[in-house]
Amino acid sequence: METILNKGLPRMAECEPAVVKVEPGKVYSWCSCGLSEKQPFCDSKHKLIENTPFKSVKMQFDKEEEVYFCQCKQTKTPPFCDDTHLTLEGVMASSK
């Protein structure tokens, strides 16, 4: 497999949170690098990044509830959305 340069990461997957109804007892692995094709969840693509500082963030929940997972990858409260994406929309639009 080819190594991915650790440049311009983490990549913003979406400029909005992913709303997921979580199940109690199930383990969820959140993607921190933004490269996963299973957003907002990890598919281990971070392991291909050179000298990777990224890892999946694993969590379980005690009850069924709706959770807002960050997809801009800039949250200060990983893996949860803290509305940082609202400050990034102009950045995302200008990079397209």
Image (cartoon, rainbow, N blue to C red):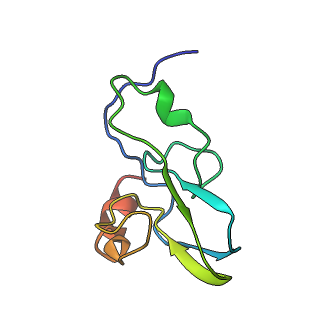
Vertical placement of residue 57 versus 20, above or below = above
Q: Position of residue 26 (x, y in %)?
A: 69, 64
**Residue 47, image x and y in percent?**
49, 29
User: Between residues 21 and 62, which one lies in front from this camera angle?
Assistant: 62
35 left or right of 91 in image: right
Q: Residue at x 48, y 47 (%)?
A: 56
In the rendered view, would you say 57 is above or below 9?
below
Identify the residue at horizontal 28%, vertical 67% (top origin): 76
Give the number of marks.
0
Residue at 63% in and 45% down: 37
Residue pushed farthest top?
1
Which residue is found at the position 57% from the left and 58% from the top?
Answer: 40
Reply above or below: 91 against 10. below
Q: Dividing the picture into quarters, in which one does residue 8 lie?
A: top left
- In the rendered image, residue 96, in percent from the top left (x then y), is placed at 43, 53
Quarter placement of the N terminus: top right
Q: Which quarter of the figure has residue 87?
A: bottom left
Q: Is residue 74 above or below residue 32?
A: below
Residue 74 point in image, percent of width and height: 33, 60
Rendered image quadrant of residue 78: bottom left
* 28 displayed left or right of 57: right
